[in-house]
């Protein structure tokens, strides 16, 4: 059953009600944002290795549960919600990759990082290596790191990213170019 149409103001009101503890706010919010969260999750999963054990529906469920559990978050609007959702999806995927790596290590299997993303575009990125590189980017350039989260993990377009961060589309384009170059360099150097 498709979600009811949602306007930015409807979602903002529901987020405020959720924070205030309204009993049915989470259920109404889920109905309004499910399709968009599922689209974000599907986009994130397309970038994962084939045979990944997480499915988009499970990823959406886990992300939504974490988001509605954030009672201390001062939700500003729909864009802010989806920005945090993108970050949450990134964390879930990274946690899952770490757990998988621990299992492989515990069973004596060797886990290696991809040699070069640029030379082998058909191979999926090593999510842990990307997360480490993204953390280094975040230390050097926090806004550019947020743009990567929104675009890569959240699947947001340039204009949507600009709205979520309250910056111009031109700034998003410049920062996106810088961030991709930074991450590619970090991933290729293996540092």
Image: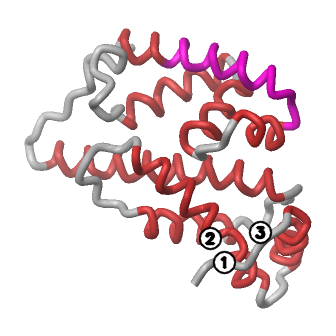
Q: Residues within 10 Å of mark 2 (few under 14, many from 20)?
A: some
Residue with the mark numbered 2: 34
Question: In the drawing, what numbered circle is on residue 3?
Answer: 1
Counting residues from the start of the chain, the first of labels 2 and 3 encountered is 2
Task: Report x, y in % for residue 13.
Answer: 90, 72
Counting residues from the start of the chain, the first of labels 3 and 1 encountered is 1
Residue 105 drawn above or below residue 26? above
- Going by the image, does 152 lie left or right of 115? right
- Going by the image, does 129 lie left or right of 169? left
Q: Residues within 10 Å of mark 3 (few under 14, many from 20)?
A: some
* Main SS of residues in magenta: helix
Which residue is nearer to you in this view: 35 or 100? 35
Residue at 67% x, 76% y is 30
Q: Is residue 7 magenta?
A: no
Task: Report x, y in % for residue 40.
Answer: 56, 54
Task: Report x, y in % for residue 111.
Answer: 19, 34
Counting residues from the start of the chain, the first of labels 2 and 1 encountered is 1
Q: Residues within 10 Å of mark 1 (few under 14, many from 20)?
A: some
Which of the 4 image quarters holds residue 7? bottom right
Residue most toward the bottom?
23
Residue with the mark numbered 3: 71
**CA gap, disc 2 to disc 1?**
7 Å
Which residues fall within the magenta stretch? 166-183
């Amino acid at each position: 059953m498709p979600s009811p149409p949602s306007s930015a103001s409807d979602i903002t009101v529901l987020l405020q009600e959720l924070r205030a503890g309204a009993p049915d706010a989470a259920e109404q919010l889920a109905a309004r944002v499910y399709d968009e969260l599922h689209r974000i999750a599907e986009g994130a999963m397309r970038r994962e290795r084939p045979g990944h054990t997480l499915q988009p529906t499970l990823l959406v469920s886990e992300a939504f549960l974490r988001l509605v559990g954030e009672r201390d978050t001062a939700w500003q609007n729909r864009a802010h919600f989806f920005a945090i959702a993108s970050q949450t999806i990134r964390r879930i995927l990274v946690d899952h990759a770490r757990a998988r790596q621990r299992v492989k290590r515990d069973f004596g299997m060797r886990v290696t990082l991809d040699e070069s993303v640029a030379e082998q575009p058909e191979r999926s990125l090593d999510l842990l290596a990307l997360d480490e590189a993204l953390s280094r980017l975040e230390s050097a350039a926090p806004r550019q790191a947020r743009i990567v989260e929104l675009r890569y993990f959240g699947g947001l377009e340039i204009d949507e990213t600009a709205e979520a961060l309250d910056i111009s589309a031109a700034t998003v384009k410049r920062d996106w170019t810088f961030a991709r170059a930074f991450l590619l360099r970090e991933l290729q150097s293996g540092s």
